[in-house]
Amino acid sequence: MVGQRFRWAAVSLTAVCLAAAGSGVAVGDPYPAFPPDQNQLPQLPSEPQIYDLLPIPVPAEDPWYGDPADLASYAPGQIIRSRTVQTRILGIPFPVDTRQLLFRSNDIHDNPIATATSVITPGIPWAGGPRPVVSFQEAIDSTNSACNPSYTLQVGTMKEAALAVGWLAQGFAINVPDFDGKFNTFNTFDEGKMVLDSLRAMKNEASLGLSDSGIAMYGYSGGGSGSIRAAEMRESYAPDVRLLGTAIGGTPGDLRLQARYATEQRPGLTGISNFTMWLGFAGLAKEFPEQFDATKLLTKEGQAILADMRSRCVYTVALSGMYRPISDYFQPGMTLENAPGVMQVLREQSLGQHIPDSPIFWFHGIWDELIPASVVLPVVNDYWNRGADLRFYTMPLPEHVVNAGAGWPPAVAWISAVLRGLPPGPRFKADFQLPG
């Protein structure tokens, strides 16, 4: 058994990286032919197809994730079951204690759902009070449960795992929730519910010793969406969860503006943004099937692309959907603007429905090609005018991922300070904008 585990740790990353090149990975129905001015990449194998080659079952095939028959009788945050798993980084076992909790939460329509969180505790002793906790919302940005961190932490492919190491090295515990749920919705306020209920579950598991811990949240891009939605909803949905602060970056604010930006063909680097609308459509259709009805809005070719996107993680969604505007696949006369109910859903799921009642640290790149500052600043200004305890700045750097790396160190410093009992600092709004 020891030898098997060692071999698994050594080869897991290799299997994930090389499986796409093998002949044993089947792909779905082929894409339709694309116009010559669009993305010409061949259809890629999906990450779940690759994960099928690994010895750890994906969530859809793992009975641990199954709903109990009496799910509705559970309270939000109540634990359904728990287990201890091995966390891996790049396929290599990492020396931490990882407890996974399956718990009850609610979807956007307040129906009961079950989802998971992973609570990671380092071996570093903590003295002088309860160990602080960082609730780390990864940018899941995917439409399949095999992309959720409760699974990718086990196989070693969680794409933001290296950032989590920085928190663990300080002795903090980390809560990593599957905040898009097992059905992987996207950019809706049930993300906030699932984050908050994951923290309730963490507090409810007495053996973790984190029931009285100070909590701060971090997330970038899609992870920022889950984090800030939890901060907005805390007062009304989970007043029993005490937050000391939330740091986010690269997060869309007004979803109507984001949809208008990502729907159309765009030049240069900004054309990468097209994938975000395919991803958004696929996720929102799960919660709002009447409004985001592919059979009414999209051509047969568009429906084929969307169906393929529903079984992918963010990397192959991005490679498949960039430079491929969804507007080219609308049925004649259809747009997001005139499709019944679509813009209303986007408005209701945009940030700013509530003002967080805890300190916020927010950064955004001035040349972000995926989520332009113009999508974010209206919400930032609304936060500011309504008295949010906000620290916001735009960074004069290009590219979404570059800004993620550059914004992480100051976010770490700020969260580390508030978790250690220091004040969050004064409010400020350094929202530099491009001319014109």
Image: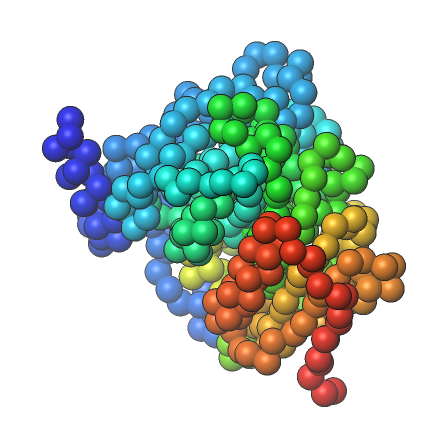
Count of picture labels: 0
Q: Which residue in the rendered view is the most extreme toward the right? A: 386
Quadrant location of the C terminus in the rendered image: bottom right
Q: How is the image coloured?
A: rainbow
Quadrant location of the N terminus in the rendered image: top left
Where's residue 314, x and y in %?
46, 53
Q: Nearer the viewer, residue 426 or 78?
A: 426
Q: Nearer the viewer, residue 22 or 18?
A: 18
- Residue 329 visible: no
Decide if residue 254 is on the left or right side of residue 131.
Answer: right
Q: Nearer the viewer, residue 328 or 313?
A: 313
In which quarter of the view is residue 93 placed? top left
Decide if residue 44 is on the left or right side of residue 105.
Answer: left
Where's residue 250, x and y in %?
60, 63
Q: Is residue 119 above or below residue 31?
A: above
Where's residue 51, x and y in %?
32, 40
Q: Is residue 138 above or below residue 276?
A: above
The residue shown at (54%, 24%) is 205
Q: Which residue in the rendered view is the most extreme toward the front? A: 128
